[in-house]
Image (cartoon, coloured by chain):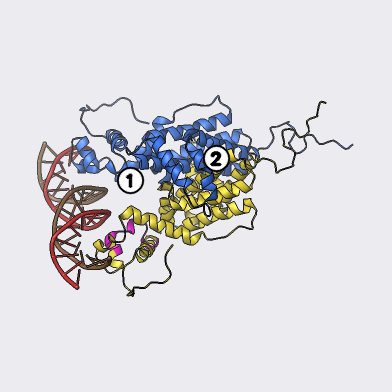
Chain colours: A yellow, B blue, C brown, D red
DNA sequence: ACCTGAACACCGTTCAAGT
DNA sequence: ACCTGAACACCGTTCAAGT
Protein backbone atom coordinates (compact mmCIF):
# COMPACT_ATOMS: atom_id res chain seq x y z
CA UNK A 1 0.00 0.00 0.00
CA UNK A 2 1.17 3.57 0.70
CA UNK A 3 4.65 3.97 2.05
CA UNK A 4 4.98 5.40 5.49
CA UNK A 5 8.22 7.34 5.04
CA UNK A 6 8.00 10.21 2.60
CA UNK A 7 11.49 11.31 1.55
CA UNK A 8 10.31 14.40 -0.34
CA UNK A 9 9.71 17.50 1.68
CA UNK A 10 5.98 18.21 1.63
CA UNK A 11 4.75 21.72 1.83
CA UNK A 12 1.55 21.78 3.78
CA UNK A 13 -0.39 23.20 0.86
CA UNK A 14 0.96 20.78 -1.76
CA UNK A 15 -1.72 19.07 -3.79
CA UNK A 16 -2.13 15.29 -3.65
CA UNK A 17 -4.73 12.77 -4.62
CA UNK A 18 -5.49 12.22 -0.97
CA UNK A 19 -6.05 15.88 -0.19
CA UNK A 20 -8.24 16.22 -3.27
CA UNK A 21 -10.41 13.25 -2.33
CA UNK A 22 -10.74 14.49 1.24
CA UNK A 23 -11.77 17.93 0.04
CA UNK A 24 -14.27 16.33 -2.35
CA UNK A 25 -15.86 14.36 0.49
CA UNK A 26 -16.12 17.52 2.54
CA UNK A 27 -17.66 19.45 -0.31
CA UNK A 28 -20.12 16.64 -1.02
CA UNK A 29 -21.14 16.42 2.62
CA UNK A 30 -21.71 20.15 2.90
CA UNK A 31 -23.19 21.07 -0.46
CA UNK A 32 -24.61 17.79 -1.75
CA UNK A 33 -24.04 16.03 -5.03
CA UNK A 34 -24.53 19.10 -7.16
CA UNK A 35 -22.04 21.03 -5.07
CA UNK A 36 -19.04 19.04 -6.26
CA UNK A 37 -17.58 21.09 -9.07
CA UNK A 38 -14.03 21.26 -10.30
CA UNK A 39 -14.12 24.99 -9.92
CA UNK A 40 -15.52 24.90 -6.39
CA UNK A 41 -13.10 22.15 -5.45
CA UNK A 42 -10.19 24.11 -6.94
CA UNK A 43 -11.20 27.23 -5.02
CA UNK A 44 -11.39 25.16 -1.84
CA UNK A 45 -7.87 23.91 -2.52
CA UNK A 46 -6.64 27.31 -3.68
CA UNK A 47 -5.73 26.31 -7.21
CA UNK A 48 -7.09 26.32 -10.70
CA UNK A 49 -9.39 23.54 -11.93
CA UNK A 50 -6.71 22.19 -14.23
CA UNK A 51 -4.42 21.29 -11.32
CA UNK A 52 -6.85 18.64 -10.11
CA UNK A 53 -6.60 16.78 -13.39
CA UNK A 54 -2.96 16.07 -12.72
CA UNK A 55 -3.96 13.80 -9.83
CA UNK A 56 -7.36 12.55 -10.88
CA UNK A 57 -8.52 11.31 -14.28
CA UNK A 58 -12.00 12.84 -14.32
CA UNK A 59 -15.06 13.53 -12.27
CA UNK A 60 -16.48 10.03 -12.13
CA UNK A 61 -13.18 8.66 -10.95
CA UNK A 62 -13.16 11.34 -8.27
CA UNK A 63 -16.67 10.42 -7.17
CA UNK A 64 -15.73 6.76 -6.99
CA UNK A 65 -12.64 7.57 -4.93
CA UNK A 66 -14.71 9.73 -2.58
CA UNK A 67 -17.27 6.94 -2.13
CA UNK A 68 -14.50 4.47 -1.52
CA UNK A 69 -12.92 6.73 1.10
CA UNK A 70 -16.19 7.12 2.98
CA UNK A 71 -16.97 3.42 3.17
CA UNK A 72 -13.40 2.44 3.98
CA UNK A 73 -13.49 4.93 6.85
CA UNK A 74 -16.92 3.89 8.11
CA UNK A 75 -16.69 0.13 7.83
CA UNK A 76 -13.71 -0.97 9.85
CA UNK A 77 -15.58 -3.07 12.40
CA UNK A 78 -13.95 -6.41 13.01
CA UNK A 79 -16.64 -8.94 13.81
CA UNK A 80 -14.66 -12.15 13.70
CA UNK A 81 -16.02 -13.20 17.08
CA UNK A 82 -19.71 -12.69 16.32
CA UNK A 83 -22.18 -15.28 15.18
CA UNK A 84 -22.60 -15.13 11.39
CA UNK A 85 -26.05 -13.58 11.76
CA UNK A 86 -24.69 -10.87 14.00
CA UNK A 87 -21.77 -10.25 11.69
CA UNK A 88 -24.08 -9.88 8.70
CA UNK A 89 -26.24 -7.42 10.61
CA UNK A 90 -23.12 -5.49 11.56
CA UNK A 91 -21.94 -5.23 7.96
CA UNK A 92 -25.38 -4.15 6.83
CA UNK A 93 -25.62 -1.53 9.57
CA UNK A 94 -22.17 -0.25 8.67
CA UNK A 95 -23.37 0.44 5.14
CA UNK A 96 -26.62 1.91 6.43
CA UNK A 97 -24.91 4.32 8.80
CA UNK A 98 -22.32 5.37 6.25
CA UNK A 99 -25.12 6.33 3.89
CA UNK A 100 -27.00 8.06 6.64
CA UNK A 101 -23.95 10.24 7.22
CA UNK A 102 -23.16 10.71 3.50
CA UNK A 103 -26.30 10.35 1.37
CA UNK A 104 -24.43 11.11 -1.86
CA UNK A 105 -22.35 7.98 -1.22
CA UNK A 106 -25.54 5.93 -1.21
CA UNK A 107 -26.43 7.19 -4.63
CA UNK A 108 -22.98 6.35 -5.92
CA UNK A 109 -23.02 2.89 -4.35
CA UNK A 110 -26.25 2.03 -6.09
CA UNK A 111 -24.95 3.19 -9.44
CA UNK A 112 -21.42 1.88 -9.60
CA UNK A 113 -20.82 -1.56 -11.10
CA UNK A 114 -18.67 -4.11 -9.24
CA UNK A 115 -16.21 -1.61 -7.84
CA UNK A 116 -13.88 -2.16 -4.88
CA UNK A 117 -16.37 -0.83 -2.32
CA UNK A 118 -19.09 -3.23 -3.31
CA UNK A 119 -16.70 -6.11 -3.63
CA UNK A 120 -15.59 -5.57 -0.05
CA UNK A 121 -19.18 -5.67 1.17
CA UNK A 122 -19.94 -8.72 -0.96
CA UNK A 123 -16.90 -10.52 0.43
CA UNK A 124 -17.86 -9.85 4.05
CA UNK A 125 -21.41 -11.03 3.48
CA UNK A 126 -20.31 -14.08 1.54
CA UNK A 127 -17.89 -15.21 4.18
CA UNK A 128 -20.62 -15.22 6.79
CA UNK A 129 -23.02 -17.00 4.45
CA UNK A 130 -20.39 -19.70 4.18
CA UNK A 131 -20.09 -19.93 7.96
CA UNK A 132 -23.87 -20.27 8.13
CA UNK A 133 -23.53 -23.59 6.34
CA UNK A 134 -25.15 -22.70 3.05
CA UNK A 135 -24.05 -25.21 0.40
CA UNK A 136 -21.50 -23.92 -2.09
CA UNK A 137 -23.89 -23.75 -5.03
CA UNK A 138 -26.28 -21.47 -3.15
CA UNK A 139 -23.74 -19.18 -1.50
CA UNK A 140 -23.55 -16.80 -4.42
CA UNK A 141 -27.32 -16.41 -4.51
CA UNK A 142 -27.55 -15.84 -0.77
CA UNK A 143 -24.77 -13.25 -0.67
CA UNK A 144 -26.18 -11.48 -3.74
CA UNK A 145 -29.64 -11.32 -2.24
CA UNK A 146 -28.29 -9.67 0.88
CA UNK A 147 -26.12 -7.27 -1.12
CA UNK A 148 -28.90 -6.28 -3.50
CA UNK A 149 -31.30 -5.65 -0.65
CA UNK A 150 -28.70 -3.46 1.05
CA UNK A 151 -28.04 -1.58 -2.20
CA UNK A 152 -31.75 -1.04 -2.70
CA UNK A 153 -32.16 0.48 0.74
CA UNK A 154 -29.00 2.50 0.15
CA UNK A 155 -30.43 4.11 -2.97
CA UNK A 156 -33.78 4.69 -1.36
CA UNK A 157 -32.32 6.31 1.73
CA UNK A 158 -30.13 8.53 -0.38
CA UNK A 159 -33.17 9.59 -2.41
CA UNK A 160 -35.15 10.32 0.74
CA UNK A 161 -32.30 12.31 2.24
CA UNK A 162 -32.17 14.38 -0.94
CA UNK A 163 -35.94 14.90 -0.80
CA UNK A 164 -35.65 16.14 2.77
CA UNK A 165 -32.57 18.36 2.30
CA UNK A 166 -33.16 21.23 4.65
CA UNK A 167 -36.84 21.71 3.82
CA UNK A 168 -38.68 19.81 6.53
CA UNK A 169 -37.72 17.54 9.40
CA UNK A 170 -38.11 13.78 9.37
CA UNK A 171 -41.30 13.59 11.42
CA UNK A 172 -43.12 16.12 9.26
CA UNK A 173 -41.89 14.34 6.17
CA UNK A 174 -43.21 10.95 7.30
CA UNK A 175 -46.43 12.64 8.33
CA UNK A 176 -46.86 14.13 4.87
CA UNK A 177 -46.16 10.85 3.07
CA UNK A 178 -48.43 8.98 5.44
CA UNK A 179 -51.25 11.43 4.75
CA UNK A 180 -50.66 11.16 1.01
CA UNK A 181 -50.88 7.37 1.18
CA UNK A 182 -54.00 7.48 3.29
CA UNK A 183 -55.78 9.57 0.67
CA UNK A 184 -54.98 7.30 -2.27
CA UNK A 185 -57.73 5.80 -4.37
CA UNK A 186 -59.04 2.81 -2.34
CA UNK A 187 -59.79 0.91 -5.52
CA UNK A 188 -56.27 1.17 -6.86
CA UNK A 189 -54.18 1.28 -3.71
CA UNK A 190 -55.91 -0.76 -1.00
CA UNK A 191 -52.70 -2.15 0.46
CA UNK A 192 -50.74 1.09 0.52
CA UNK A 193 -53.70 2.86 2.16
CA UNK A 194 -53.81 0.13 4.76
CA UNK A 195 -50.22 0.52 5.84
CA UNK A 196 -50.21 4.32 5.62
CA UNK A 197 -50.47 4.84 9.36
CA UNK A 198 -47.64 2.40 10.06
CA UNK A 199 -45.45 4.92 8.29
CA UNK A 200 -45.96 7.53 10.97
CA UNK A 201 -43.95 5.88 13.72
CA UNK A 202 -41.61 4.01 11.50
CA UNK A 203 -37.91 3.58 12.15
CA UNK A 204 -35.85 3.17 8.98
CA UNK A 205 -33.07 1.47 10.82
CA UNK A 206 -35.33 -1.08 12.51
CA UNK A 207 -37.18 -1.81 9.29
CA UNK A 208 -33.87 -2.24 7.49
CA UNK A 209 -32.74 -4.82 10.02
CA UNK A 210 -36.11 -6.56 9.90
CA UNK A 211 -35.58 -6.98 6.17
CA UNK A 212 -32.14 -8.43 6.77
CA UNK A 213 -33.61 -10.88 9.24
CA UNK A 214 -36.25 -11.88 6.72
CA UNK A 215 -33.60 -12.75 4.17
CA UNK A 216 -31.56 -14.52 6.84
CA UNK A 217 -34.61 -16.61 7.65
CA UNK A 218 -34.86 -17.53 3.99
CA UNK A 219 -31.17 -18.35 3.85
CA UNK A 220 -31.40 -20.63 6.85
CA UNK A 221 -33.71 -22.79 4.74
CA UNK A 222 -30.81 -23.39 2.36
CA UNK A 223 -28.54 -24.44 5.16
CA UNK A 224 -27.03 -27.89 4.97
CA UNK A 225 -27.02 -29.61 8.33
CA UNK A 226 -23.73 -29.44 10.26
CA UNK A 227 -21.64 -32.62 9.91
CA UNK A 228 -23.17 -35.54 11.79
CA UNK A 229 -26.65 -34.08 12.10
CA UNK A 230 -29.67 -35.75 10.60
CA UNK A 231 -30.75 -33.97 7.39
CA UNK A 232 -34.31 -32.63 7.68
CA UNK A 233 -35.65 -34.65 4.76
CA UNK A 234 -34.94 -37.98 6.41
CA UNK A 235 -35.84 -36.93 9.93
CA UNK A 236 -38.83 -38.84 11.19
CA UNK A 237 -38.89 -41.20 8.23
CA UNK A 238 -39.00 -44.80 9.14
CA UNK A 239 -36.26 -47.12 7.86
CA UNK A 240 -37.96 -49.97 6.00
CA UNK A 241 -35.52 -52.80 6.54
CA UNK B 1 -57.79 10.00 -17.49
CA UNK B 2 -57.25 11.60 -20.92
CA UNK B 3 -60.38 12.41 -22.90
CA UNK B 4 -60.93 10.45 -26.02
CA UNK B 5 -62.59 13.13 -28.10
CA UNK B 6 -60.36 16.07 -28.94
CA UNK B 7 -62.40 19.01 -30.20
CA UNK B 8 -59.38 21.04 -31.29
CA UNK B 9 -57.91 20.24 -34.66
CA UNK B 10 -54.46 18.73 -34.09
CA UNK B 11 -51.77 19.25 -36.63
CA UNK B 12 -49.62 16.18 -36.81
CA UNK B 13 -46.52 18.08 -35.80
CA UNK B 14 -48.09 19.89 -32.84
CA UNK B 15 -46.12 19.61 -29.63
CA UNK B 16 -47.64 17.94 -26.58
CA UNK B 17 -46.42 16.55 -23.31
CA UNK B 18 -47.11 13.08 -24.59
CA UNK B 19 -45.08 13.51 -27.76
CA UNK B 20 -42.23 15.03 -25.79
CA UNK B 21 -42.13 12.15 -23.31
CA UNK B 22 -42.27 9.59 -26.12
CA UNK B 23 -39.41 11.29 -27.92
CA UNK B 24 -37.43 11.42 -24.67
CA UNK B 25 -37.88 7.67 -24.16
CA UNK B 26 -36.72 7.06 -27.71
CA UNK B 27 -33.69 9.28 -27.29
CA UNK B 28 -32.80 7.65 -23.98
CA UNK B 29 -33.08 4.19 -25.47
CA UNK B 30 -30.89 5.02 -28.42
CA UNK B 31 -28.27 7.31 -26.94
CA UNK B 32 -28.33 6.50 -23.24
CA UNK B 33 -28.72 8.76 -20.25
CA UNK B 34 -26.22 11.33 -21.45
CA UNK B 35 -27.96 11.55 -24.80
CA UNK B 36 -31.07 13.21 -23.41
CA UNK B 37 -30.51 16.90 -23.98
CA UNK B 38 -33.02 19.65 -24.46
CA UNK B 39 -31.23 20.65 -27.62
CA UNK B 40 -31.13 17.13 -29.03
CA UNK B 41 -34.73 16.55 -28.01
CA UNK B 42 -35.76 19.85 -29.60
CA UNK B 43 -33.96 18.95 -32.82
CA UNK B 44 -35.71 15.56 -32.81
CA UNK B 45 -39.04 17.36 -32.44
CA UNK B 46 -38.08 20.10 -34.88
CA UNK B 47 -38.34 23.02 -32.47
CA UNK B 48 -36.21 25.14 -30.23
CA UNK B 49 -35.30 24.01 -26.71
CA UNK B 50 -37.52 26.64 -25.17
CA UNK B 51 -40.67 25.11 -26.65
CA UNK B 52 -40.27 22.02 -24.48
CA UNK B 53 -40.45 24.10 -21.33
CA UNK B 54 -43.98 25.05 -22.15
CA UNK B 55 -45.10 21.44 -21.60
CA UNK B 56 -42.56 20.21 -19.07
CA UNK B 57 -41.24 21.91 -15.95
CA UNK B 58 -37.62 20.82 -16.16
CA UNK B 59 -35.32 17.95 -16.95
CA UNK B 60 -35.86 15.89 -13.82
CA UNK B 61 -39.60 16.04 -14.28
CA UNK B 62 -39.10 14.86 -17.85
CA UNK B 63 -36.92 11.97 -16.71
CA UNK B 64 -39.52 10.97 -14.15
CA UNK B 65 -42.27 11.08 -16.75
CA UNK B 66 -40.17 8.99 -19.14
CA UNK B 67 -39.51 6.41 -16.44
CA UNK B 68 -43.17 6.35 -15.57
CA UNK B 69 -44.14 5.82 -19.21
CA UNK B 70 -41.77 2.91 -19.61
CA UNK B 71 -42.94 1.05 -16.53
CA UNK B 72 -46.60 1.74 -17.19
CA UNK B 73 -46.14 0.30 -20.68
CA UNK B 74 -44.14 -2.72 -19.58
CA UNK B 75 -46.05 -3.75 -16.49
CA UNK B 76 -49.62 -4.33 -17.51
CA UNK B 77 -49.77 -8.04 -16.68
CA UNK B 78 -52.89 -9.00 -14.80
CA UNK B 79 -52.09 -11.86 -12.47
CA UNK B 80 -55.25 -12.01 -10.44
CA UNK B 81 -55.54 -15.75 -11.05
CA UNK B 82 -52.01 -16.72 -9.98
CA UNK B 83 -50.89 -17.94 -6.61
CA UNK B 84 -49.42 -15.08 -4.59
CA UNK B 85 -45.90 -16.44 -5.05
CA UNK B 86 -46.37 -16.58 -8.80
CA UNK B 87 -47.87 -13.11 -8.86
CA UNK B 88 -44.93 -11.69 -6.91
CA UNK B 89 -42.48 -13.33 -9.27
CA UNK B 90 -44.42 -11.89 -12.22
CA UNK B 91 -44.29 -8.36 -10.81
CA UNK B 92 -40.58 -8.72 -10.11
CA UNK B 93 -39.89 -10.05 -13.60
CA UNK B 94 -41.89 -7.21 -15.09
CA UNK B 95 -39.59 -4.71 -13.44
CA UNK B 96 -36.54 -6.75 -14.38
CA UNK B 97 -37.47 -6.94 -18.04
CA UNK B 98 -38.42 -3.29 -18.25
CA UNK B 99 -34.97 -2.39 -16.97
CA UNK B 100 -33.34 -4.86 -19.29
CA UNK B 101 -35.00 -3.06 -22.19
CA UNK B 102 -34.40 0.44 -20.81
CA UNK B 103 -31.35 0.52 -18.50
CA UNK B 104 -31.65 4.26 -17.91
CA UNK B 105 -35.04 3.61 -16.32
CA UNK B 106 -33.39 1.31 -13.80
CA UNK B 107 -31.07 4.09 -12.73
CA UNK B 108 -34.00 6.45 -12.34
CA UNK B 109 -36.06 3.93 -10.41
CA UNK B 110 -33.30 3.44 -7.88
CA UNK B 111 -32.85 7.17 -7.39
CA UNK B 112 -36.38 8.50 -7.24
CA UNK B 113 -38.11 8.75 -3.88
CA UNK B 114 -41.63 7.36 -3.42
CA UNK B 115 -42.88 8.32 -6.85
CA UNK B 116 -45.91 6.85 -8.63
CA UNK B 117 -43.94 4.12 -10.36
CA UNK B 118 -42.55 2.73 -7.16
CA UNK B 119 -45.81 3.07 -5.38
CA UNK B 120 -47.49 0.94 -8.02
CA UNK B 121 -44.88 -1.79 -7.60
CA UNK B 122 -45.13 -1.58 -3.81
CA UNK B 123 -48.90 -1.91 -3.97
CA UNK B 124 -48.78 -4.99 -6.16
CA UNK B 125 -46.23 -6.67 -3.93
CA UNK B 126 -48.06 -5.73 -0.77
CA UNK B 127 -51.38 -7.08 -1.95
CA UNK B 128 -49.83 -10.49 -2.59
CA UNK B 129 -48.03 -10.42 0.73
CA UNK B 130 -51.43 -9.94 2.30
CA UNK B 131 -52.84 -12.90 0.39
CA UNK B 132 -49.91 -14.97 1.61
CA UNK B 133 -51.28 -14.63 5.12
CA UNK B 134 -48.59 -12.43 6.62
CA UNK B 135 -49.96 -10.73 9.75
CA UNK B 136 -50.78 -7.05 9.36
CA UNK B 137 -47.90 -5.79 11.45
CA UNK B 138 -45.33 -7.58 9.29
CA UNK B 139 -46.81 -6.82 5.87
CA UNK B 140 -45.02 -3.52 5.49
CA UNK B 141 -41.67 -5.11 6.27
CA UNK B 142 -42.24 -7.99 3.88
CA UNK B 143 -43.34 -5.79 0.99
CA UNK B 144 -40.48 -3.37 1.61
CA UNK B 145 -37.93 -6.17 1.65
CA UNK B 146 -39.14 -7.38 -1.72
CA UNK B 147 -39.23 -3.86 -3.16
CA UNK B 148 -35.78 -2.93 -1.91
CA UNK B 149 -34.29 -6.12 -3.26
CA UNK B 150 -35.87 -5.43 -6.64
CA UNK B 151 -34.62 -1.84 -6.59
CA UNK B 152 -31.13 -3.02 -5.71
CA UNK B 153 -31.02 -5.40 -8.64
CA UNK B 154 -32.50 -2.66 -10.82
CA UNK B 155 -29.68 -0.28 -10.04
CA UNK B 156 -27.07 -2.96 -10.44
CA UNK B 157 -28.38 -4.11 -13.79
CA UNK B 158 -28.54 -0.57 -15.03
CA UNK B 159 -24.94 -0.02 -13.95
CA UNK B 160 -23.83 -3.20 -15.68
CA UNK B 161 -25.65 -2.31 -18.84
CA UNK B 162 -23.90 1.04 -18.83
CA UNK B 163 -20.56 -0.67 -18.28
CA UNK B 164 -21.20 -2.91 -21.26
CA UNK B 165 -22.58 -0.27 -23.63
CA UNK B 166 -21.36 -1.38 -27.00
CA UNK B 167 -17.84 -2.27 -25.93
CA UNK B 168 -17.98 -6.02 -25.34
CA UNK B 169 -20.66 -8.66 -25.37
CA UNK B 170 -22.12 -10.20 -22.24
CA UNK B 171 -20.13 -13.45 -22.28
CA UNK B 172 -16.80 -11.66 -22.64
CA UNK B 173 -17.81 -9.28 -19.90
CA UNK B 174 -18.64 -12.06 -17.46
CA UNK B 175 -15.43 -13.80 -18.44
CA UNK B 176 -13.41 -10.69 -17.65
CA UNK B 177 -15.04 -10.12 -14.28
CA UNK B 178 -14.71 -13.81 -13.42
CA UNK B 179 -10.99 -13.70 -14.23
CA UNK B 180 -10.57 -10.54 -12.17
CA UNK B 181 -12.25 -12.14 -9.17
CA UNK B 182 -10.19 -15.29 -9.52
CA UNK B 183 -6.98 -13.29 -9.27
CA UNK B 184 -7.92 -11.40 -6.12
CA UNK B 185 -5.74 -11.59 -3.03
CA UNK B 186 -6.67 -14.94 -1.38
CA UNK B 187 -6.04 -13.46 2.06
CA UNK B 188 -8.47 -10.61 1.61
CA UNK B 189 -11.06 -12.08 -0.76
CA UNK B 190 -11.34 -15.82 -0.12
CA UNK B 191 -15.08 -15.96 -0.68
CA UNK B 192 -15.18 -13.88 -3.84
CA UNK B 193 -12.34 -15.95 -5.32
CA UNK B 194 -14.26 -19.08 -4.49
CA UNK B 195 -17.38 -18.07 -6.38
CA UNK B 196 -15.49 -16.50 -9.31
CA UNK B 197 -16.09 -19.42 -11.65
CA UNK B 198 -19.81 -19.52 -10.86
CA UNK B 199 -19.92 -16.13 -12.55
CA UNK B 200 -19.00 -17.57 -15.90
CA UNK B 201 -22.23 -19.39 -16.62
CA UNK B 202 -24.46 -17.20 -14.61
CA UNK B 203 -27.92 -16.11 -15.63
CA UNK B 204 -28.94 -12.73 -14.19
CA UNK B 205 -32.60 -13.53 -14.58
CA UNK B 206 -32.41 -16.88 -12.82
CA UNK B 207 -30.31 -15.46 -10.02
CA UNK B 208 -32.78 -12.61 -9.64
CA UNK B 209 -35.66 -15.04 -9.24
CA UNK B 210 -33.65 -17.19 -6.83
CA UNK B 211 -33.25 -14.11 -4.67
CA UNK B 212 -36.99 -13.46 -4.79
CA UNK B 213 -37.62 -17.05 -3.75
CA UNK B 214 -35.18 -16.67 -0.88
CA UNK B 215 -37.10 -13.69 0.43
CA UNK B 216 -40.40 -15.49 -0.14
CA UNK B 217 -39.09 -18.37 1.94
CA UNK B 218 -38.27 -15.93 4.70
CA UNK B 219 -41.71 -14.35 4.40
CA UNK B 220 -43.47 -17.70 4.67
CA UNK B 221 -41.97 -17.92 8.15
CA UNK B 222 -44.01 -14.86 9.12
CA UNK B 223 -47.19 -16.39 7.81
CA UNK B 224 -50.07 -16.85 10.15
CA UNK B 225 -51.83 -20.13 9.53
CA UNK B 226 -54.97 -19.93 7.38
CA UNK B 227 -58.15 -20.16 9.42
CA UNK B 228 -58.78 -23.70 10.66
CA UNK B 229 -55.36 -25.08 9.87
CA UNK B 230 -53.09 -26.56 12.49
CA UNK B 231 -50.31 -24.11 13.36
CA UNK B 232 -46.87 -25.59 12.55
CA UNK B 233 -45.65 -25.39 16.14
CA UNK B 234 -48.25 -27.89 17.34
CA UNK B 235 -48.15 -30.17 14.34
CA UNK B 236 -46.75 -33.58 15.21
CA UNK B 237 -46.85 -32.83 18.90
CA UNK B 238 -48.53 -35.43 20.93
CA UNK B 239 -51.53 -34.38 22.97
CA UNK B 240 -50.84 -35.28 26.57
CA UNK B 241 -54.29 -35.89 27.89
C1' DA C 1 7.10 17.01 -12.30
C1' DC C 2 3.65 19.83 -11.16
C1' DC C 3 0.69 23.92 -11.35
C1' DT C 4 -1.92 27.93 -13.66
C1' DG C 5 -5.91 29.82 -15.76
C1' DA C 6 -7.73 31.09 -20.11
C1' DA C 7 -10.34 28.83 -23.64
C1' DC C 8 -13.42 25.22 -25.84
C1' DA C 9 -17.43 22.81 -26.35
C1' DC C 10 -20.91 21.88 -24.25
C1' DC C 11 -25.04 22.07 -20.74
C1' DG C 12 -30.11 23.53 -18.45
C1' DT C 13 -32.93 27.27 -18.30
C1' DT C 14 -34.92 31.94 -19.27
C1' DC C 15 -37.18 35.34 -21.80
C1' DA C 16 -38.24 38.96 -25.10
C1' DA C 17 -40.24 38.61 -29.28
C1' DG C 18 -43.09 36.63 -32.47
C1' DT C 19 -47.65 34.02 -34.24
C1' DA D 1 -51.98 29.93 -26.02
C1' DC D 2 -48.07 28.34 -27.90
C1' DC D 3 -43.61 28.53 -30.22
C1' DT D 4 -38.84 30.56 -31.45
C1' DG D 5 -34.02 30.96 -30.70
C1' DA D 6 -30.68 34.04 -28.92
C1' DA D 7 -28.61 34.79 -24.49
C1' DC D 8 -27.19 33.78 -19.56
C1' DA D 9 -24.84 31.39 -16.22
C1' DC D 10 -23.01 27.72 -15.63
C1' DC D 11 -20.49 22.98 -16.48
C1' DG D 12 -16.27 19.24 -17.42
C1' DT D 13 -12.14 19.11 -19.68
C1' DT D 14 -7.96 20.59 -22.32
C1' DC D 15 -3.73 22.72 -23.08
C1' DA D 16 -0.17 26.15 -23.92
C1' DA D 17 2.52 28.39 -20.88
C1' DG D 18 4.85 28.84 -16.78
C1' DT D 19 7.87 27.14 -12.47
In which quadrant of the rendered image does the N terminus of chain B lie? top left
Q: Quadrant of residue A224?
A: top right
Report the front residue among B227 and B99.
B99
Task: Write the start and end of the magenta stretch as one range.
Answer: A29-41
Q: Is residue A132 within the magenta segment? A: no
Secondary structure, mark 2, is helix
Report the front residue among A141 and B227.
A141
Using residue B240 as the reference point, say whether residue A100 is left or right of it: left
Q: Nearer the viewer, mark 1 or mark 2?
A: 2
> Is residue A207 among the parts visible in the rendering?
no
Counting from the top left corner in percent of width and height, residue A68 is at 43, 57
Say which chain tag 1 marks: B
Seen at 53% across and 54% down, the residue is B187
Q: Which residue is mark 2?
A: A141
In which quadrant of the rendered image does the C terminus of chain B lie? top right
Counting from the top left corner in percent of width and height, residue A87 is at 60, 54
Using residue A233 as the reference point, say whether residue B63 is left or right of it: left
Q: Is residue A30 within the magenta segment? A: yes
Classify A23 as above or below A123. Answer: below
Secondary structure, mark 1, is helix
Amino acid sequence: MATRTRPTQRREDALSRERIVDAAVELLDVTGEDGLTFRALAAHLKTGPGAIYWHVTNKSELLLAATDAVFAREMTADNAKDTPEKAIRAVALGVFDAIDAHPWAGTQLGLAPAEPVMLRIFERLGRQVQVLGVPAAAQFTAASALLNYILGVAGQNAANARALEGTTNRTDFLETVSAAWASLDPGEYPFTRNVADQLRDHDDRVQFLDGIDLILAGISGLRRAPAGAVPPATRGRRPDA
